[in-house]
Amino acid sequence: MMKKSRLSYRKSMKMQGSLLIGGSAISFFTKNVSLKGLHACCTEANGLEVGDMVYVCLPLMKMEGVASIIWKKLERDGICHIGLKFLKMRGIGGSAYHYRYEGRILSR
C-alpha cells in the first residue's frame, strides 16, 4: 500500500499549548507543526474524539483558533497523540498571522 505524500513541510518543534473544548482545558506539547496543523501529545484526552472541533492556543507562536481532530492514538504509557488540522487560526499579541482552511475535512 502506498502512503499519501505530505502536502506541507513539518517542523519538529516542542512547545506547550492548550486545547479548549466545552469548559475544559487540556495542556499538550507539540511534536511537530506545519502550516496546516500539528501533532500534539498529552496525558489527558478524555472526551476528545476524531472529528471534534477544538480551540487551540499556542502562546509561544502567538497563535490561536479553531482546529479539527483528524486522528487520535493512545499509547500504552498513557500518552495520547492527536493530529490537529487548523481550520481558522489568527495571530495574537501583535502577530499578523491569519489562516483559514478552504477545503474538506478528511479523517484517517
Image (cartoon, rainbow, N blue to C red):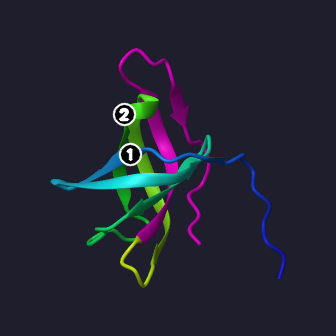
What x and y, as percent, mark residue 83?
Answer: 51, 61
What x and y, as percent, mark residue 52?
Answer: 38, 62
Q: Quadrant of the N terminus?
A: bottom right
What x and y, as percent, mark residue 27?
Answer: 30, 53
Q: Nearer the viewer, residue 37 or 29?
A: 29
Q: Which residues are magenta?
A: 80-108
Lateral position of residue 61 relative to residue 59, left or right: right
Image mark for residue 59: 2
Q: Earlier in the sequence, mark 1 or mark 2?
A: 1
Q: Is residue 99 visible?
A: yes
Give above or below for 47 relative to 57.
below
Give above or below for 24 relative to 13.
below
Residue at 38% x, 45% y: name it: 16
Q: Residue furthest left?
A: 23
Q: Quadrant of residue 45?
A: bottom left
Q: Nearer the viewer, residue 63 or 32?
A: 32
Q: CA distance from mark 1 to mark 2?
A: 8 Å
Residues at discs 1 and 2 in contact (Cβ within 8 Å): yes
Q: Amino acid at mark 2?
A: Pro
Q: Quadrant of the C terminus?
A: bottom right
Q: Which residue is mark 1?
A: 16
Q: Is residue 50 visible?
A: no
Lateral position of residue 78 relative to residue 87, left or right: left
Give above or below for 75 relative to 13.
below
Q: Amino acid at mark 1?
A: Gln
How many C-alpha atoms fall within 10 Å of the one at disc 2: few (<14), some, or many (≥20)?
A: some
Dot 1 falls on a residue whose secondary structure is strand
Q: Quadrant of residue 36?
A: top right
What x and y, as percent, mark residue 75?
Answer: 45, 80
How many C-alpha atoms fall within 10 Å of the one at disc 1: few (<14), some, or many (≥20)?
A: some
